[in-house]
Amino acid sequence: MIDFAALRKEFPILHQEVHGKPLVYLDNAATTQKPQAVIDAIVHYYGQINSNVHRGVHTLSQRATDAFEATRGKLQKLVNAAHEHEIIYTTGTTGSINLVAHGFRSLLGPGDEIVVSQLEHHSNLVPWQMLAQHTGATLRYIPIVADGSLDLEEAQRLLTPSCKLLAFNHISNALGTVNPVKQLTEWAHAVGACVVVDGAQGLPHRPVDVQDLGVDFYAGSAHKMYGPTGTGMLYGRTEWLEKLPPYQGGGEMISTVTMAQSTYAGLPFKFEAGTPNIEAVVGWGAALDWMNAIGMDALMAHEADLMAYGTERLKAIDGLVLFGTAPEKSAVLSFGFADLHPYDLGTLLDQQGIAVRTGQHCTQPIMDYYSIPGTVRASFAAYSNREDVDRLAVGVERALRMLR
Ligand SMILES: *Cc1c(COP(=O)(O)O)cnc(C)c1O
């Protein structure tokens, strides 16, 4: 049994007061807090190892390279990629998706279609709009239905031989909807489309097996899974990574450079130009070890309990509307009140030491669907507990008394 109460003690940031009240941190879909093990790994890196990677024969450079590359192996295991070179380090989910979208510039043209969903974070939407603009391809949307899941019948209709690329998220950051990745991928592959999955919320909350899911690309961010900001990964199937041109030019990504031309390095380095965020990658390795020690089954059970409890507590509040009620949901409770602006509620919660996200959550098309300016979003992580949920429910009731 995992002692989740003890595990919470490993997060120094959680043990402070905000506006004179013990902090309740429920903004985990925006970023998670970091356990001491991750903080220690970064301090150790700068105190003992710091050096540039892949460059020197000297001992420190080799140690830095080993620590940096060890995380790649851990990520390969995490998502069950067939090869370690299929894991590309990026700046995060946004960086990963832009890498793929940029690569497709030479592969698409007028008449081709890109299918995305209405459930997307802007970072899995704007790059495809830019790609469509650049190539003349057409962007089409899988709409959502009332409970915040995708309209799968419409998805099937949109997946025709004109569709060259399908992009959607594993789990919605705004509503918590868990999408049927394997099913959508099968449909897309049946018409020959490439499948890109935004896994920013998938990696922290669900087991991911890219070979079983069959996806061509899967993107994630370290900071959403107890690791540092500024680094992330792109899993890409070898055939696709070979087909795509390099994203950025510079050091690290070349094999030979003359004044006339250059040849590119093999995978994964072809996509890793310049000095990477080494300390963040090393810290991410520590975060992966930390998550593995808990295990995804225990983590999912813990979060499912909080979701059941939180849903019940929030539903009991008069006038509260819950957005996103799909049968399979992850650790997000998004809600609002017809007569209140989410920002006002969020401000009054902050005054009680409760950190939630308010607004559109980088998913404006979802808010447009519900015709609302935004929601208040409480999202859970491993260290969240029922007391956090109680504080939230009491905090909302108190805010309502002040606002009405
Ligand atoms: C956070 C998030 C992103 C963007 O991740 P960055 O780390 O900001 O690049 C994309 N999609 C989803 C679903 C997210 O939750």
Image: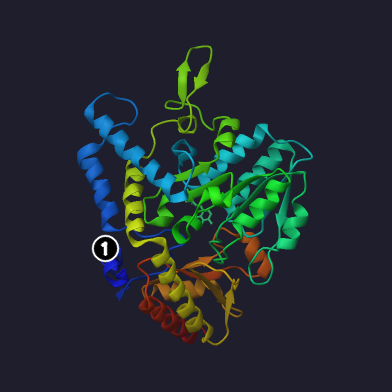
User: Looking at the rendering, which quadrant does residue 306 occupy?
Assistant: bottom left
Task: Give the residue at x 22% y 29%.
Answer: 59
Q: As drawn, is 97 to the left or to the right of 284?
A: right
Q: Name above or below for residue 238 compared with residue 28.
A: above
Asked if residue 15 shows in the view, the reply is no
Dot 1: element: loop
Q: Residues within 10 Å of mark 1 (few under 14, many from 20)?
A: some
**For the N terminus, which image quadrant?**
bottom left
Residue type at mark 1: give it. Glu
In this view, the residue in front, 376 or 282, is 282
Residue 9 locus on image (x, y percent): 26, 67
Residue 358 locus on image (x, y percent): 51, 67
Residue 131 locus on image (x, y percent): 66, 40
Q: Residue furthest left?
A: 48
Asked if residue 112 shows in the view, the reply is yes
Disc tally is 1
Q: Is mark 1 within 8 Å of ligand 1?
A: no
Q: As drawn, is 152 to the left or to the right of 181?
A: right
Q: Name above or below for residue 372 compared with residue 41.
A: below
User: Looking at the rendering, which quadrant does residue 156 occupy?
Assistant: bottom right
Q: Name above or below for residue 132 compared with residue 181.
A: above
Q: Name above or below for residue 63 compared with residue 360.
A: above
In this view, the residue in front, 137 or 263, is 263
Task: Give the residue at x 56% y 76%.
Answer: 336
Query: Mark 1 = which residue?
Result: 10
Residue 173 locus on image (x, y percent): 53, 61
